[in-house]
Image (cartoon, helix red, strand yellow):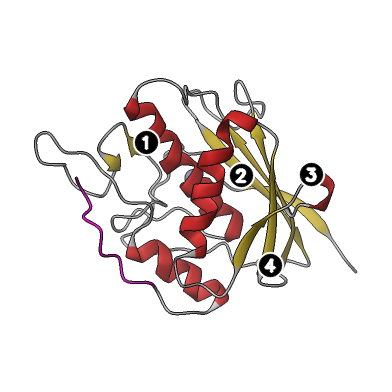
Amino acid sequence: MLLALPVLVAGWLLAVASPAAAYKLYGPLWRDDDITYYNSYRPYDEFVDRGAQAWNASGMNARFRRVTSASKADVRIGLFSRPALPRIPPGTVGYTTLTILDKRVFVAGKVSLTLLTPDGVKEDRAMLQLIVNHELGHAIGLDHDQGTCALMNVQVRRGAGPEKCGTPPRGKRYCRMLELDDERGAMALYGGTPAPVTTPRFC
Ligand SMILES: [Zn+2]
């Protein structure tokens, strides 16, 4: 029997108690290595495309590919002005839901983002990019990771990046798109070889 269960998987600011560990997976993955996406909120296009490119450059044997209509997309990305689900606490700035077939494959994904100000201060643009990268991580099957520095940490700090990534030196800010631990999580799902992370964490 086939079961399609919508599962709430992600709230950026949800407090989750996790044991010290590296990347964590939900378990299921996409059926093939071509993961299509469609973003319906145009002002976020550049962030979504950059986030998809970051995951595509991770070394994983799967690819995000933009398609031109929502009906053709595995992952639908859009805006929500405030959290629509009762389990999502105030302060949540992104969440992802995945529909899982037979407890092993994703058949649909939905990434909801909040209205930050893409035309506003630099910090907001940088934070929005981190949120998009994080939610796309959920969309490929990564759970929160509270054991080490990773984009999949539960919380992001404005300017300082994911919460487990240390404190930037004075005058610097977090500037990575992914951490090695995120890449390793993606490899665990889809295979591949993690791309070296050579850019500085703070710049
Ligand atoms: Zn999350």
Residue type beneath disc 2: Thr
Q: Earlier in the sequence, mark 4 or mark 3?
A: 4
Q: Earlier in the sequence, mark 1 or mark 3?
A: 3
Look at the image and say whether residue 68 sits in the magenta stretch. no
SS type, badge 3: helix
**Residue 50 left/right relative to 153:** right
Q: Is residue 16 above or below residue 200?
A: above
Residue type beneath disc 1: Ala
Residue bearing the label numbered 3: 70
- Separation (CA) of disc 1 from disc 3: 26 Å
SS type, badge 4: strand
Question: Dot 2: within a 10 Å radius of its alpha carbon, few (fewer than 14), some, or many (20 or more) residues?
Answer: many
Where residue 41 appears, as percent x and y from the top left, is 65, 31
- Separation (CA) of disc 4 from disc 2: 19 Å
Viewer-side label of 2, 1: 1
Viewer-side label of 2, 3: 3
Q: Earlier in the sequence, mark 4 or mark 1?
A: 4
Between residue 140 and residue 72, name the one nearer to us: 72
Name the disc covering residue 96, or none. 2
- Distance from mark 3 CB to nearest ligand 1 atom below 8 Å: no
Residue type beneath disc 4: Asp
**Residue 40 left/right relative to 185:** right
Residue type beneath disc 3: Ala
Magenta segment range? 195-203
Residue bearing the label numbered 1: 126
Look at the image and say whether residue 201 sits in the magenta stretch. yes
- Distance from mark 4 CB to nearest ligand 1 atom below 8 Å: no
